[in-house]
Amino acid sequence: MAGPVIDVIASLLPKATEREVSKKVSLVAAQYGLGASFGTEVIRSLYEKEGEAVETLARELDHPLVFTVTSNPQSTDAHEAFRELNPWRKGAKPSESSLLKFFKEFWNIEGIDGATFFLYEELSPSSPSIPRYKMSFSQFVDWMTRYYEIDTSRRNKGGAEGIFTVRKETSRLP
């Protein structure tokens, strides 16, 4: 792994199919020049510890769809996509990044009830010290917009990395 990783464990509504939702996710990712690789097996084949951690998180949901978001269809991490979030980079506009545009469209895909976003870079994906957060989608978008500022201010507390449980207001999930 060369840079930040974003794994998504989407919670699908009972009538939603993994095939239909994954097609929509792929199209939205492609629209913003990002990649999406689906399944714990694919993630495990790239990084064993990450695959184990994602598999554990997926077991917390009844109808999960697991994928990792990458900087482009040929990448294995989200390093380049995260560069757009860096407010200290010349010309950067984090709130207009491809990643945030993707997340906003992903959130509106029919059949998605909520998601767990697993973000890590420096912590081991199997570390018990990875912080867990529950928040609204708008709070998650704000966190991602300010990722580098949060990461710098919380350096001794795991930075901006973590496991983010986000549910829709109409969610049937706890």
Image: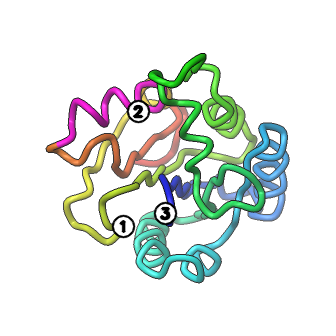
Query: Residue 167: x and y, percent?
Result: 48, 40
Q: 97 or 8: nearer the eye?
A: 97
Q: Are marks 1 and 2 in contact (CB under 8 Å)?
A: no
Residue 148 lies in magenta, yes or no? Answer: yes
Q: 14 or 39: nearer the eye?
A: 39
Q: Find the distance from the CA under tag 1 to the CA under tag 2.
A: 18 Å
The image shows residue 120, relative to residue 66, as above or below, that is above
Q: Quadrant of residue 12?
A: bottom right
Q: Which residue is mark 1?
A: 125
In the picture, the disc for residue 147 is: 2
Magenta stretch, overall SS: helix
- Asked whether, in this view, residue 102 is left or right of residue 62, the answer is right
Query: Residue 42: x and y, percent?
Result: 64, 77
Q: What's the residue type where badge 2 is placed?
A: Tyr
Q: Quadrant of residue 160?
A: top left
Residue positioned most to the left = 156
Q: 103 or 110: nearer the eye?
A: 103
| 10 Å crowding of disc 2: few (<14), some (14-19), many (20+) | many
Q: Find the distance from the CA under tag 1 to the CA under tag 3.
A: 19 Å
Label count reads 3
- Asked whether, in this view, residue 82 is left or right of residue 165, the answer is right
Q: Find the distance from the CA under tag 2 to the CA under tag 3.
A: 26 Å
Query: Residue 147: x and y, percent?
Result: 41, 32
Which structural element holds mark 1? Answer: loop
Q: What's the residue type where badge 1 is placed?
A: Pro
Which structural element holds mark 2? Answer: helix
N-terminal-most mark, 1 or 2? 1
Which structural element holds mark 3? Answer: loop
Span highlighted in magenta in the image: 144-155
Q: Residue at x 21, y 41 (%)?
A: 155
Q: Which residue is mark 3?
A: 61
